[in-house]
Image (cartoon, helix red, strand yellow):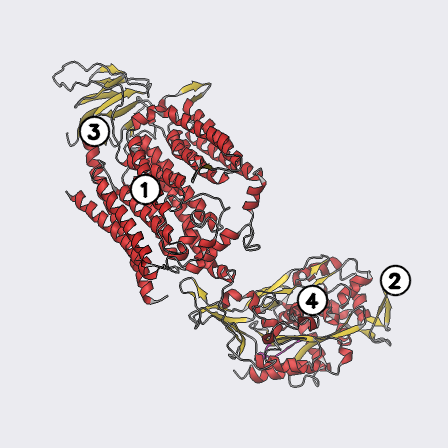
């Protein structure tokens, strides 16, 4: 009988393997069915809401929007037409579909929806504050990670479709906050962080370099300062406040700041160093480009400019804002931003909830605290009247683009308030052609958020 | 007496199961004229009744597999008749009847394993002939022979013969010959050669889809053969065999022809209209059907090539629901599970049952997991459910073999023995030298 | 999909389920029938040691010391594969598998012999009685 048992053993094994396979298949189908349905060409999309229940997108097309009502979020929320692929709807279209394996495709009355963290009212105010000037602004709660404001100009009315797509200006179909741009002097924050990590605060504050408007570096090239008369001898605090280029060039050359260590700290912060590749930060499916820079030799012109904010350095506004969170949190850990507060399935039941997540420690808490003090002092000395009513830590930047023909203005910062923890980044393109200032936009952001966000 | 009651109940419930399906077709189905449903119902119920009547004349120990088979075949008739609109699929109906006949033949041929073992050389000859037929009549890259309106797939017919060739009795495994330090059974080498031949043939035909089935049958047969070594080599041999198989598999994948390589790495969603068309449509079909299906005849998959065999699982899932198609698979599993409930009484039949179990399970696995993009997509069929004459006939024959394992006959075939049961004999009966097998 | 359709689906599925269950029960029922038939075919015989009885459950019974033998006699005097018992036409036959010590049936050294009720089989130092089931 043992012999027959042996046959039965092998048969059981075969059957068990098969049944395990079937179980795996059922699980797979359960998990991926909505993905299959999205590929079938048939779908019944639900709605996207902002944090106050305002409709930002309606897949059924039944909601009537005023003209340009959605213009401030058009290229962030997007639609299902397939023109824009890096938008919230395009990336999360599965969870917006009124389909479940049990219920099938619900033709009408399905409750699939995405509730975003965006504050549409405030976002609209921020959009208007650009007065038509190109650029973008993004702000989030650095304690929780909810993105409250994310607008990008130029934009368009998504409800009108793409008939006149040829007339769209470049950058219309993308949310610029997710894409890399020249950071200008906002990059100096990263350099300060690197210097603090390597030398420690005492040693860095003991350093002083002089600026006479231009500095001939050890490689033989001239690093010009935006102040042609020079800033004289400064310490790090003054250099940050003056945004002095020669100071930072000399700091990079300093033997106490080995470039190898700078590289490793930049990598830890999320830069792609000396590499053509480009990683992405995932924000609820939306791909946000990671920062990149080239650092070869501390005496090299390009490397020095890379640490000052020109050269090959490119950073997306969202990432600049995330570093502000690591500083403002005093922990050296970035708060990961998210857009989706929660989603509901076809029955209206919550099936996903956005959660606060933190990155790994990218620099020490001491560094965070010191940088925070530097930025707060800068904010107090230079921005207290411009952004009145808030205790902000900020760093501005001016970036030369189009081979120096146009100048973009940037402003990154945070509010030092436990009850109003906002970090932001503003990019204003071609600043010389407009009277709008990044500080004005920052004020609008904070005013409108404190109005509507804190109310709830 | 109680067994009669059990059989009456079995008949009743098989008819109720078919009735439930037909009711579903009647109320939920997509048909233009009620006549189609009536014809289908009549055909199904008639076949049920006819088979139950015929069963009265079969003398078997067990009938469970018979009931399961008629249940499954009529289910398959209903499924196949509903694809894209209800009307009786006459072709499938006829092939199902042929399959039932093949089942009887399989039973009658296989029930006496001692007689069967004497015919072993004919299995080899049969496989040889089929291989020659394949080599000469079907071209490379083709596995079909067309005879007027009928197409035959000769490689299917190798399967039952191969299962029988792999089967063995204990006595056979004890006839060992010593070569150097190893005790070997010559037949195991013959079998290995046969497997290699089949492998080369399938390679030549570009029919690598059915290769795993043969490999599985061989693997089971091999495992059951080497379970009776002269003690020491058992574990090592097993491990060695496993390693060899693994190496063969890796080398096979590495040097597989281009079109196989392509199939191994296909992202079906990147180009749903290209290579992955069938799988992506199948998956969408399953998603569309959900748990309870769209209703018989309302599916869209009947527009897809090979909806009635290669991706039949998805087609049924779409129309009847995933739940129902899983239950259909469950019924097939019960058929091959029967030898676990009611064990065969001889090692030969045990190995046959194991081979059949492996063949069915692997075929179902290849078909279902292939069409759902879990493994490379191959063109094998699900036993009983897929349409296709050769496959259905062979499945029927193999089920007949399973029935034979359940209701075996233990008779020494020849020479006819003269046994005197005279207990009065004081002496020991003359020592009876067994015929060598 | 309306409620009626769902109910019908459920009915069809349930009837199939119940049918499968009934057939499984039938198979279990047949298990005992098959066992009885097997007993009849093998003349209700079994092998017995002093206090242990070995059922003869299939048509080839391998007796030996090896772990994979059907009837295992853990005694060094028994070869690994000592003897093979087969049945046909209701008559059991015992055959020597090339053992060292041979088989003695009722005291006679045999190579292969048909067994009768209450034969005493001696394999090495072990004695087995070929007897009717339930005997003692």
Q: CA distance from mark 1 to mark 4?
A: 70 Å
* Pointer 2 and pointer 1 on the same chain: no
Q: Label 4: which residue?
A: A180
**Chain of residue at mark 3:** C
Q: CA distance from mark 4 to mark 3?
A: 86 Å
Residue B426 on image: x %, y %: 14, 14
Q: CA distance from mark 3 to mark 2?
A: 106 Å
Q: Label 2: which residue?
A: A220
> Which quarter of the rendering shows the N terminus of chain A?
top left
Q: Are marks 1 and 3 in contact (CB under 8 Å)?
A: no
Q: Is residue B194 visible?
A: yes
The numbered disc on residue A148 is none
The reply, left or right, for residue B189 in relation to residue C44 is right
Q: CA distance from mark 1 to mark 3?
A: 36 Å
Q: Residue at x 53, y 66 (%)?
A: A93
Q: Label 1: which residue?
A: B97
* Pointer 1 and pointer 4 on the same chain: no
Q: Residue at x 50, y 73 (%)?
A: A60
Question: Within 10 Å of the Cα at label 1, are there few (<14), some (14-19), or many (20+) other Cα atoms?
Answer: some
Instruction: Establish if B176 lies above or below A278.
Output: above
**Would you say residue A416 sits in the magenta stretch?**
yes
The numbered disc on residue C42 is 3
**Chain of residue at mark 2:** A
**Would you say residue C34 sits in the magenta stretch?**
no
Which tag is nearer the camera, tag 3 or tag 2?
Answer: 3
The image quarter in which residue A89 lies: bottom right
Q: Are marks 2 and 1 in contact (CB under 8 Å)?
A: no
Residue B134 on image: x %, y %: 48, 32
Which tag is nearer the camera, tag 2 or tag 4?
Answer: 4
Q: Which residues are magenta?
A: A412-421
Which tag is nearer the camera, tag 2 or tag 1?
Answer: 1
């Amino acid at each position: 009988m043992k012999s027959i048992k042996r046959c039965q053993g092998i048969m059981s094994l075969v059957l068990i393997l098969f049944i395990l396979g079937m179980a795996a298949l059922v699980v797979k189908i359960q998990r991926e069915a909505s993905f299959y349905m999205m590929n079938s060409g048939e779908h019944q999309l639900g709605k996207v809401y902002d944090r106050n229940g305002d409709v930002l997108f309606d897949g059924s097309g039944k909601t009537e929007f005023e003209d340009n009502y959605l213009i401030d979020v058009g290229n962030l929320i997007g639609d299902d037409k397939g023109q824009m692929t890096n938008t919230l709807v395009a990336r999360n279209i599965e969870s917006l579909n009124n389909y479940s394996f049990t219920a099938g495709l619900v033709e009408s009355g399905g409750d699939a929806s995405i509730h975003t963290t965006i504050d549409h009212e405030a976002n609209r105010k921020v959009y208007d504050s650009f007065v038509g000037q190109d650029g973008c602004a993004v702000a989030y709660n650095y304690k929780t990670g909810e993105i409250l404001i994310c607008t990008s100009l130029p934009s368009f009315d998504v409800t009108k479709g793409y008939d006149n797509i040829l007339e769209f200006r470049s950058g219309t179909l993308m949310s610029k906050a997710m894409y890399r741009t020249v950071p200008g002097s906002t990059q100096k924050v990263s350099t300060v962080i690197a210097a603090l990590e390597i030398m420690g605060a005492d040693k860095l504050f003991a350093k002083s370099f002089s600026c006479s408007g231009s500095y001939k570096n050890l490689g033989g090239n001239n690093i010009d300062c935006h102040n042609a008369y020079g800033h004289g001898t400064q310490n790090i605090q003054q250099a940050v406040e003056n945004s002095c280029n020669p100071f930072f060039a000399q700091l990079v050359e300093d033997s106490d700041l080995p470039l190898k260590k700078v590289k490793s700290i930049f990598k830890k912060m999320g830069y792609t160093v000396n590499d053509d590749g480009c990683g992405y930060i995932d924000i609820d499916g939306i791909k946000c480009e990671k920062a990149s820079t080239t650092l070869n030799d501390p005496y090299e012109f390009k490397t020095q400019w890379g640490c000052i904010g020109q050269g090959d350095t490119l950073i997306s506004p969202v990432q600049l804002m995330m570093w502000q969170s690591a500083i403002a949190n005093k922990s050296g850990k970035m708060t990961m931003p998210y857009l989706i507060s929660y989603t509901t399935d076809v029955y209206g039941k919550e099936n996903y909830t956005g959660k606060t997540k933190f990155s790994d420690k990218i620099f020490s808490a001491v560094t965070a605290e010191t940088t925070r003090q530097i930025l707060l002092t800068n904010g107090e000395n230079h921005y207290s009247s411009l952004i009145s009513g808030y205790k902000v830590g900020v760093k501005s930047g001016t970036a030369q683009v189009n081979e120096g023909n146009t100048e973009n203005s940037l402003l990154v910062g945070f509010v030092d308030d436990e009850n109003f923890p906002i970090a932001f980044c503003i990019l204003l393109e071609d600043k010389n052609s407009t009277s709008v200032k990044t500080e004005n936009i920052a004020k609008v952001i904070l005013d409108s958020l404190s109005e509507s966000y804190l109310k709830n | 007496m109680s067994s009669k009651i059990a059989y009456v109940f079995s008949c009743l419930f098989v008819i109720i199961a078919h009735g439930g399906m037909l009711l579903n077709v009647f109320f939920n189905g997509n048909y233009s004229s009620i006549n189609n449903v009536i014809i289908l119902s009549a055909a199904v119920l008639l076949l049920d009744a006819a088979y139950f009547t015929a069963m009265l004349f079969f003398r078997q120990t067990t009938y469970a597999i018979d009931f399961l088979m008629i249940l499954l075949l009529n289910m398959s008739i209903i499924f196949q008749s509903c694809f894209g609109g209800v009307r009786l699929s006459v072709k499938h109906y006829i092939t199902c009847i042929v399959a039932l006949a093949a089942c009887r033949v399989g039973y009658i041929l296989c029930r006496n394993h001692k007689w069967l073992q004497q015919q072993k050389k004919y299995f080899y000859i049969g496989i040889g002939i089929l291989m020659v037929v394949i080599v000469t009549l079907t071209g490379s890259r083709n596995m079909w022979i067309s005879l007027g309106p009928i197409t035959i797939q000769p490689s299917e017919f190798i399967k039952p013969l191969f299962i029988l060739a792999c089967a063995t009795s204990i006595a056979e495994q004890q006839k060992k010959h010593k070569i150097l330090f190893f005790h070997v059974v010559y037949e195991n080498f013959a079998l290995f050669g046969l497997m290699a031949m089949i492998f080369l043939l399938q390679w030549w035909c570009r029919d690598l889809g059915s290769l795993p089935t043969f490999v599985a049958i061989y693997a089971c047969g091999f495992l059951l053969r080497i379970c009776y070594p002269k003690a020491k080599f058992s574990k090592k041999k097993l491990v060695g065999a496993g390693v060899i198989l693994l190496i063969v598999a890796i080398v096979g994948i590495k040097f597989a022809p281009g079109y196989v390589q392509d199939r191994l790495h296909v992202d079906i969603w990147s180009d749903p209209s290209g290579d992955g068309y069938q799988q992506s449509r199948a998956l969408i079909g399953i998603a569309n059907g959900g748990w309870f299906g769209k209703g018989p005849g309302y599916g869209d998959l009947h527009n897809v090539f090979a909806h009635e065999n290669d991706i039949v699982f998805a087609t049924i899932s779409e129309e009847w629901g995933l739940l129902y198609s899983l239950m259909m698979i469950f019924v097939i599993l019960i058929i091959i599970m029967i030898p676990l409930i009611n064990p065969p009484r001889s090692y030969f039949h045990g190995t046959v049952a194991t081979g059949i179990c492996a063949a069915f399970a692997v075929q179902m696995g290849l078909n279902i997991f292939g069409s759902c993009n879990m493994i490379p997509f191959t063109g094998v069929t699900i036993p009983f459910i897929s349409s296709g004459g050769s496959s259905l006939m062979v499945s029927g024959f193999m089920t007949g073999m399973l029935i034979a394992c359940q209701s075996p006959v233990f008779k020494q075939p020849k020479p006819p023995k003269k046994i005197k049961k005279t207990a009065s004999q004081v002496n020991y009966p003359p020592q009876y030298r067994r015929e060598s097998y | 999909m309306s409620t009626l359709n769902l109910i019908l689906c459920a009915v069809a599925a349930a009837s199939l389920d119940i049918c499968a269950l009934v057939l499984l029960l039938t198979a279990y029922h047949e298990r005992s029938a098959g066992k009885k038939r097997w007993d009849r075919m093998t003349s209700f015989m079994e092998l017995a040691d002093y206090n242990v009885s070995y059922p003869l459950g299939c048509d080839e019974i391998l007796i030996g010391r090896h772990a994979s033998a059907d009837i295992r006699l853990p005694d060094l005097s028994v070869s690994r594969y000592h003897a093979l018992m087969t049945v046909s036409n209701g008559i059991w036959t015992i055959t020597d598998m090339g053992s060292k010590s041979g088989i003695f049936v009722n005291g006679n050294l045999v190579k292969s012999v048909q067994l009768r009720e209450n034969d005493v089989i001696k394999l090495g130092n072990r004695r087995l009685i070929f007897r009717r089931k339930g005997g003692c």
